[in-house]
Amino acid sequence: MKKLFITAMIVARYVRHQVPGIHKHLWMWASVLVCGLVLTACSNDDDAVTPADEVEAQLQQMTLREKVGQMFYIRLESLDPSIEWTTYDDLANIKILEVTENIKRTNKDYPVGGIILYAWNIDTEEQLARIIPQIRQLNGNPLLCIDEEGGRVARIANNPNFDVKKYVSMDSIGRTGDPRNAYECGNTIGKYLKRYGFDIDFAPVADVNTNPENVVIGPRAFSGDPAVAAPMVTNYLEGLKTAGITGCIKHFPGHGDTKADTHYGYASTQKTWDEMLNCEMVTFKAGIQWGCQLIMTAHIAAPNVTGSEIPSTMSSIILQDKLRGELGYQNIIITDGMEMGAITQQYTSAEAAVGSILAGADIVLGPRYFTEAFDAVMAAVNNGTISEERINQSVRRILRLRLGMNR
């Protein structure tokens, strides 16, 4: 059975490369059809094809460029080299509401695994209904992502042109003490995101809000008590999942005990790992045990854990030793937005992309200069700085996520 399956995928790959002008989506659906026929014909075979077999077959068909593309989730503006911006207000004023020819032209050579839409990319229901199919046609078959936490970070709910339920904050839900309210919130948000065509919600916030001087998390967190926050996080995730949306807990290893905002510059926590285990890690461990598919990193430094001022996003101690090794997390690690000041004030887009992947990240979110970051990762593989097997490790996780969405 497995040999037949692999043979079918090899044939599909041959057709892809030998038939001039075959459209990438036609080839993709042909591959799916071939796999389906094989699976149906041999459904009673003891040597049945597993999801891991399917992932490996897909991986074998991909070029290095296609694999690297899957490791980038970006804003639409990153695909248009004519757009120059300095602040988030600049992006809001530019207001990209459709996939332009410039975007298509760049994307032809730079495939992407995901597109994140921001408030300035969303105007009305009609406009959103037009742009999402346009994004689906981009090279890389990108997943659709959004920050829709509820409360002050809600790209759709805070848009007056959308009639969806609004939430005051996650803190207000946490104060009820009833995790069912977190489930209802996640499920309500998940249902309208699914209806509009999204795949991933970068929510919920799993930070524990322990620092009253925190300017970036605050009421976005469910509580300052990890015992209260943990069941809220898992119930919110369950609500999203029931609605057909994949959630993402953030910001590892915890942004709740900081004073500064990583959007604009350096931020740090002074906690030791033992202190984190008794607070921040309670919520993240709960999310991991629940089965969360994505964990987003924080750009905060944790010098009493790593022994340096390096952002956690760039630290193999945080991502490999702690998150994967000690906590046993096996799914996708995605960076926070790499255009944020905590990264751009210290690293180029090239350095940040390569450094985060070397540290253990699977997906680089929102590099300041996307093509520069992409080219740097390609060069790093070609010169041996990053092995292709390291790329394959991340792409396997990403393909597993995609496969699960399609089942």
Image: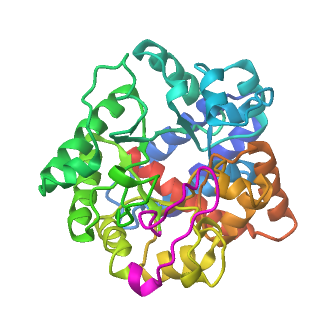
Choose top left, top right, bottom left or bottom right for residue 57.
bottom right
| Residue 125 drawn at (x, y percent) | 40, 16
| Residue 214 drawn at (x, y percent) | 44, 58
Task: Please state if 306 lies on the left or on the right of 161 as rendered.
Answer: right
The residue range painted magenta reads 253-276
Choose top left, top right, bottom left or bottom right for residue 60.
bottom right
Determine if residue 56 is in view.
no
| Residue 240 drawn at (x, y percent) | 29, 45
- Verify whether residue 255 appears in magenta: yes
Q: Residue furthest front?
A: 213
Task: Please state if 155 lies on the left or on the right of 389 as rendered.
Answer: left
Residue 57 versus residue 388 in the image, above or below? above
Closer to the camera in the image, 300 or 370: 300
| Residue 327 drawn at (x, y percent) | 41, 79
Point 23% across, 42% down: residue: 185
Task: Please state if 79 lies on the left or on the right of 330 as rendered.
Answer: right
Residue 69 versus residue 294 in the image, above or below? above
